[in-house]
Structures are given as C-alpha cells and as structure tokens.
C-alpha cells in the first residue's frame, strides 16, 4: 500500500527542487476518463419507481462505471431497471439482486459476488432506508427498531464489509481504496424535518460516517454521507400527493432559499461526486443537499 504522501504526489504530480507541486503529464489523460471509469459499484435501495438509488444507478452508468449492482429488498422492479440501463449503456454490467441491506448475510453475499466476478469493489452507496408515516408518539417499539435496523444497521454493515473488500488488490487495482457513501438526511441535523425515530436514525448515520472515516485511516477508503432535504421520491409520496390534492404543491419547498423541492437526480449527482475520485480529499463529511434549508432558521419570503 502506498503512503498518504505517495498518493498526494500521484494526484498532484511531483515536487520540484524548489518544493513546488507540479502536475505530471498524465493529468490530461485522467481528465478525459469517465468519472467512474473501471469502478465496481453496489447501490442499495435501488428498487423504487422514483428514488435516489434508481437515479444513481442511471447516473453511475452514464459516467462509465464498470459494473453496478442494483439491489433492494423488493426485487420486482430491479430486472427491468437493469435491462433498461444495459440497453442504453452496453459497456456497463448491471446486476439486479435482492438484498436486505440490514442483513449481514445478504450484504456480505453481494460484496463477495462482486469480488468473485470483477476482482474489486470501489463504491458502496448505502442508500436503503424506511420511514413510517405515523406520529412518532404513536409508533410501537417494533417499528422503531425496524427503522433503526434498516436505516442505521445497514450503514454499519456497509462500512464493515465494503471496507474489507475495498482493501483487496489485484491486476487492475494496485492499492487499497474506495468510497462508501450513505444517505442520511437534514432530519439528522435539526428538528422539524422528519419523525422522531427517522431523525434519530439519520443523526446516527452522520456520526457513523465520521467515526468510520477515522476507523479506516490510512486505507485510502473514504466514508461520507448525503443529507437530502425535501425531495420527491416514493418515500415522500404521501406528502406530495396530499399537497397536490389540496392544490398546495407550489408551496412544497418554499421554506428554503431556492423555494422549491428537489428531484432524485439532483441527489444522485452528489452521490456520483462522492463516489468519484473528484472528491478524493473529502472524508468523514455530511454533504447537505437541501436548497439551503439548513443554513438558517426558515423564513417565508414576502412577495
């Protein structure tokens, strides 16, 4: 394994006799590569009709991933997703697979399959998550624990097993390295953005990626998460359907400075950035994608 200093020199070029960093001749070649060139990726929570996982699978394929495992506990939509992506991007291997992201056996199995078939794992996007659309004070303890199992344990298992696989080297992977990305939420940063149980689970993820980054020091494996704000997905569908039925859809997202809600592709593009080498110095970070909602106390702008 190369040292952190060696990796710095590889990224920057070399140090001149005057102590200045100079770019090497390979910089232009690297810039012309697809952003996920040669990378083997696993995405959990990719089985929704409209969601971050599904959008990320498309974005990863568009940007040159070598292989993408699209996984979900619900497998009914995965084969069609894989077929559609592969038809548009025939050079990308897309493997649909039923995976309970909070099952250690399932997580280890899909990672082992990636190593067996492709000899490497570069990106694990731990995106699976659930929420119960009921008042938190009326939520029974079994459902509370299920939220913690799916939202929190799944990220722990991703860090535990993906990091082990990312240390494996071979003919086309010379050193340890990779990117683990998790989906947290602005609900993990502040109150008022989600139910009590859901918010607690997302706060745990934010802390876990920080601890995970330190635990994996000197492995060149980065651990980060994304904090989406209000975004239209299958998970938030009841909120959006209610707003549409009441004729108030134009008010959704009005409390953030951009005065709108997001679509899954806007979060998927951030997942792409964190998965790629462009974010090579970002580690242990929670990147918020909320239109500015968490930057201040929400206000209603007068018109």
Image (cartoon, rainbow, N blue to C red):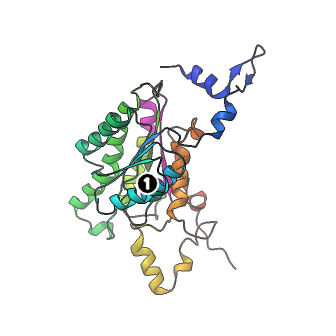
Q: How many marks?
A: 1
Please state the horizontal and vertical placement of residue 102, each as a whole percent of the image.
Answer: 28, 48
Please state the horizontal and vertical placement of residue 60, each as a whole percent of the image.
Answer: 50, 50
Say above or below: 231 vs 112.
Answer: below
Q: Residue at x 50, y 58 (%)?
A: 228
**Residue closest to the far top:** 17
Q: Nearer the viewer, residue 60 or 12?
A: 60
The secondary element bearing badge 1 is classed as helix
Task: Tell me if mark 1 has few (under 14), some (14-19) or many (20+) residues whose alpha carbon lies within 10 angstroms of its own.
Answer: some
Which residue does the numbered mark 1 point to in the structure image?
86
Q: Residue at x 47, y 59 (%)?
A: 55
Q: Nearer the viewer, residue 216 or 199?
A: 216
Please state the horizontal and vertical placement of residue 75, each as a whole percent of the image.
Answer: 29, 59
Image quarter for residue 13? top right
Image quarter for residue 254? bottom right
Please state the horizontal and vertical placement of residue 216, each as a whole percent of the image.
Answer: 43, 30
Residue 197 visible somewhere in the drawing: no
Q: Quadrant where the C terminus lies?
A: bottom right
**Residue closest to the far bottom:** 246
Say above or below: 69 vs 171.
Answer: below
Q: Nearer the viewer, residue 214 or 117?
A: 117
Query: What is the magenta range?
Result: 210-229
């Amino acid at each position: 394994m190369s040292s952190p200093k060696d990796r710095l020199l590889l990224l920057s070029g070399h140090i001149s006799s005057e102590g200045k960093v100079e770019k090497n001749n390979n910089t232009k070649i690297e810039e012309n590569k697809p952003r996920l060139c040669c990378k083997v990726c696993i995405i959990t929570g990719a089985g929704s009709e409209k969601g971050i996982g599904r959008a990320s699978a498309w974005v990863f394929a568009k940007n040159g991933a070598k292989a993408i495992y699209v996984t979900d506990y619900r497998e009914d939509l995965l084969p069609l997703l894989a077929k559609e992506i592969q038809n548009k991007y025939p050079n990308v291997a897309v493997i649909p697979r039923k995976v309970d992201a909070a099952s250690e056996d399932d997580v280890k199995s899909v990672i082992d399959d990636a190593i067996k078939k492709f000899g490497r794992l570069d990106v694990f996007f731990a995106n699976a998550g659930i929420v119960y659309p009921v008042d938190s004070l009326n939520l029974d303890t079994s459902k509370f624990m299920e939220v913690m199992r799916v939202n929190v344990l799944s990220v722990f298992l991703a860090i535990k097993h993906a990091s082990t696989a990312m240390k494996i080297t071979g003919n086309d992977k010379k050193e340890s390295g990779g990117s683990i990305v998790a989906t947290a939420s602005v609900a993990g940063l502040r109150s008022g953005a989600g139910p009590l149980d859901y918010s607690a689970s997302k706060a745990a993820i934010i802390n876990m990626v920080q601890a995970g980054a330190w635990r994996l020091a000197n492995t060149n494996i980065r651990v980060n998460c994304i904090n989406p704000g209000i975004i239209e997905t299958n998970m938030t569908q009841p909120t959006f359907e209610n707003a549409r039925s009441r004729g108030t859809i134009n008010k959704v997202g009005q409390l953030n400075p951009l005065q709108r809600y997001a679509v899954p592709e806007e979060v998927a593009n951030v997942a792409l950035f964190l998965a790629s080498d462009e974010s090579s110095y970002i580690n242990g970070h929670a990147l918020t994608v909320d239109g500015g909602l968490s930057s201040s106390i929400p206000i209603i702008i007068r018109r």
